[in-house]
Amino acid sequence: MVEPRTLDREDPDFFGAGPALLPTDVLQQAAYDLISYENDIVGVAEISHRSKPAIAIIDDTKDNLKKLLAIPDNYEVFFLQGGGTTGFSSIAYNLFANHAKRTGKKGRAAYAVTGSWSAKATEEAKRLGFEVDIAVNTKSINYGDIPPYSEWEPIKENTSYLWVCDNETVHGNEFKDTPGSEYLPKGVELVADMSSNILSKKVDISKYGLIMAGAQKNVGIAGLTIYIIRKDLLDQASDEELRKLNIPLSPIATHFPTVVKNNSAYNTIPIFACQILKLVTEKLLKEGGLEAKEKLNNKKAELLYKVLDSYPGFYNLPVKNPEVRSNMNVVFKLPSEELTAKFIAEADAAKLKGLKGHRSVGGIRASIYNAVPTSSVEKLAKFVDEFAKANS
């Protein structure tokens, strides 16, 4: 006889990098919402994306983000289908169109290559035919540090924006500051991919022209991306002007002014993904906002890095500069592939799941996002300590 299923589950010790762990109470509420949303005869995934309930979900989620991040009034929040990879192209299309409006020129873009995701963003902009300059590239040191801005290449004239990946999920480094006016010239916008650390810490939104974040790593499920853009950057040259300058036109589904004008519902927004984001942001607000969450995330990261650093001859941390280690994605390697496989197998047996490193770099990756509780990190730190004692 098949046992009846419930919405209860044992608290998981899960460290997957994305899609990633979500709070159980959020998933439970979302499950009920799938069956019946606000006591309707249908669930949230079945309602029209332009219905009053759907519009309320979009608006409430935007309001939650504005409260959590203290987003100034001269910024717009909107959502697009897809993830960070969609953002690689949509941002280039739209910001080059804005640059053309402001200057009458095609422009160029600068990219900081500090890991695999910023490298992919760079290659996509090049592939689309945009002029790209490399501000810094740390591949030669295996992305083990983020050099000071004084060591970066100067920003060239006629540059539209500087792209950074605020947190590199694969290589485990994270920006802890932003370039000031001594490096970033006036009129060059700072663009940040925050897909894997959005809402993990307080952010001064005013320092950025645009922030993009896929939801599925830290605050939601796959299918929805958050965009925060200063409103003046929505002004664009006409299609005719862009053609004359040989600037590719954005597809209408990722044309920022069109999406904003239609309140993120120009086409069919994945409203269930937006509902989960709404529930996650509501929970963050109830738990004290980003100041409280940042303190907790700092504590979790310090706990895990401390035990790893205590075995320097056994655990190799590729990010050599502790000042730029990621608070979200802790990456490390063991002395051999055999020990790596043993670590993963024994961790799995201890119900510590999702620790295998990215296929491109191997090793171990512990993603300790917002939803990963301190208790899970404490269990992992204890396992890391005991494994080193038993195998070194």
Image (spheres, rainbow, N blue to C red):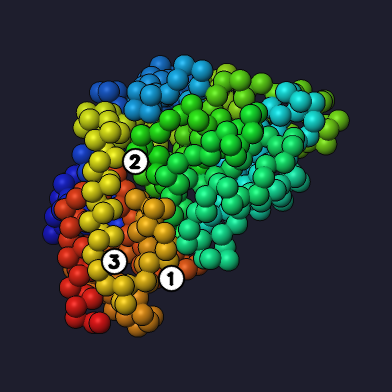
Of marks 2 and 1, which one's residue comes earlier in the chain?
A: 2
Judged from the image, the secondary structure of the residue bearing numbered disc 3 is helix
Q: Which residue is mark 2?
A: 200
User: Going 65% across and 49% down the picture, which residue do you hit?
Assistant: 153
In the image, residue 170 above or below residue 96: below
Along the line of sight, the residue nearer the viewer: 361 or 279: 361
Q: Nearer the viewer, mark 2 or mark 1?
A: 2
Label 3 sits on what residue type? Asp
Of marks 1 and 3, which one's residue comes earlier in the chain?
A: 3
Q: Which residue is mark 3?
A: 309
Judged from the image, the secondary structure of the residue bearing numbered disc 1 is loop
The reply to whether dot 1 and dot 3 touch (C-beta < 8 Å) is no
User: Going 59% across and 42% down the picture, which residue do you hit?
Assistant: 163
| Mark 2 → mark 1, Cα distance in angstroms | 25 Å
Residue 348 in the figure: left or right of residue 106: left
Residue 387 in the figure: left or right of residue 229: left
Disc 1 crowd, CA 10 A, few/some/many (<14, 14-19, 20+): some
